[in-house]
Image (cartoon, rainbow, N blue to C red):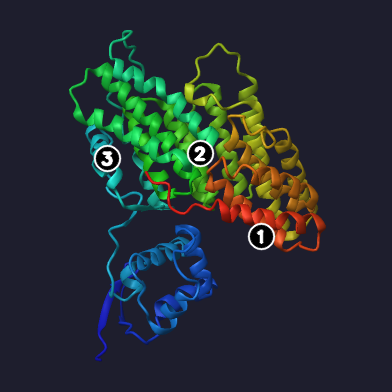
Amino acid sequence: MKEREKCWTNHWGKRWSHVATQAGEPNAVLAGCLDELGWSPKALARKLNRVFGAGTVAESAPYHWRDAGSLPRSPLPMMAAYVLSQELGRPVSVAELWQGRVGDSSALVPADTDLARPWTVQGMEAIVEDWVMGGLIDRRRFLAISGAGLLAIVAQYLDGTAGRGQYAPRITPSAGADPLVDQVEQHLPMLSALDDEHGGARHLPYVGAQFRAVGLLIREGGHAPAVASRLIRALAEIGQLAGWMAFDATDHGLAQRYFATALRAAHQVNDLPLCAHILGDLSFQAASRGHPADAIALGEAARRASDAAPPVVRASVLSRLAYAYAAAGRDNDFAHTRGAARELIASRDGGQEEPRWMYFLTDNHLDCQAGYGLIQMGRAQLKADGGARGRRFLAQGSEMLRSGAYDVPRGDPSQRRAMFEGAWLALGHSAHGDLEAACQVGQIVADRLDVVRSPRSAALLHQLAADLRRRQRNAHVRSFLPALEHALAEHAPSTQPGR
């Protein structure tokens, strides 16, 4: 078969040619990407399974892709290009990776697809239209974005070019003026309770349906300004919650899309505290995904946006920024920002109205957020030099988390928080070498897996299992590890939770 020469444009805009890979010939582009990362083909397979779900690809398959030029089934070509782009920090297109033998998958689209619209009511409604029309039959998987792409979806809000939203910050409705909107608003606290008790993955499809239902009401139009404002505010609040639940479900692209839509809606009703809160969520998500530069940029923007917000909102935003600093290893900035958040919470006097969606933030919750930031820094520091500084961070973080929710009874409504904080506490103990405590706390956390569907928390338990596998000579580890691995396998999600 005669070789075909094709051209592509790389991420610097330079055109280059490459002889198209034929079946049976090595894929030099894939091999180069793997070499640059120091990955084996098996490492690529494992990363694909972590990002897109267990069983996405057999661990042996990428060897055939690299060494024999085999073309994987759709949508694996785009999945591989996405994972490599994220890890390399630069775009690797499907055409480049597979030499033009396959196109993009319509089932996999970046989270920012069709979000580049004006920051007007009409622009927001066009984005809402996509949610409404997609509905339950939407089979797209939104791929998380980072770097310039992530910051671009909020750039016009951050630089002020978005201007002001159309509706006044507060429009007081007359009592009973619209029973349907009253019902929507009354259900908002109950939706939040679903996440608190059962985790983001269990009820995300239901909350997503509520989001689309409010979007449908907005799409129908013809509302008085007071009604339109209340509907848009409700859309923003439900969108923020759905984004948080998708984040907890580790569906990061979907979470970013919800957050971006919610920010548009909050902007239209000039709800600056909610805008700052959503930016803080985006920051926390970026830090949790291992993108500290994005997290700091978004967290500092959230801090600026919260300047005029109530103290509780400012404290929450600062706690997210502190975690971003922790993810970047900036311990002095972490300590300063965390202290500022603590001072704001201490200054609450009950005289200022607070948003209902900040119900969860207490001084203890702030301490626990600082606790897992310290454990993250401690584990990283211990891995880097094994010194006393890392151990000090671990001890401080564990002490804070022991005061939190990790051991609340199973009937307590804060099950998801208990699971997440407990997993971090167990990781703190394991890194510090206190294996008995790590196993004791780990057992409490693992016992919640049948109640809470929080893949974000389960990922921490998988990290705990990886820690303990290296310490199996310890009697506590030998007793607990098989039970942990069984529980994780038994409660592993079989499918994505949906929209």
Which residue occupies the foreground of this view, 412 or 172? 412
> What amino acid is labelled 3 in the image?
Ile
- Left or right for 254, reference 336: left
Report how far apart the C-alphas of labels 2 and 3 lie in the structure.
26 Å
Q: Which residue is mark 1?
A: 466
Compare marks 1 and 3 and give the one earlier in the sequence: 3
Tell me where residue 205 appears, x and y as whole percent: 39, 40
| Mark 1 surroundings: few (<14), some (14-19) or many (≥20) residues within 10 A | few
Kindly indicate whether the residue at mark 1 contacts the one at mark 2 (C-beta within 8 angstroms).
no
Q: Earlier in the sequence, mark 2 or mark 3?
A: 3
Number of the front mark, 2 or 3: 3
Q: Is residue 425 left or right of residue 243?
A: right
Residue 77 vertical placement versus 310 (above, below): below
| Disc assigned to residue 347 | none
Q: Amino acid at mark 1?
A: Ala
Q: Secondary structure at mark 3?
A: helix
- Which residue is drawn at the image coordinates 55% and 22% (left, top)? 311
Judging by the rendered image, the residue that carries numbered circle 2 is 300
Asked whether residue 332 appears in the rendered view, the answer is no
Q: Which residue is mark 3?
A: 127
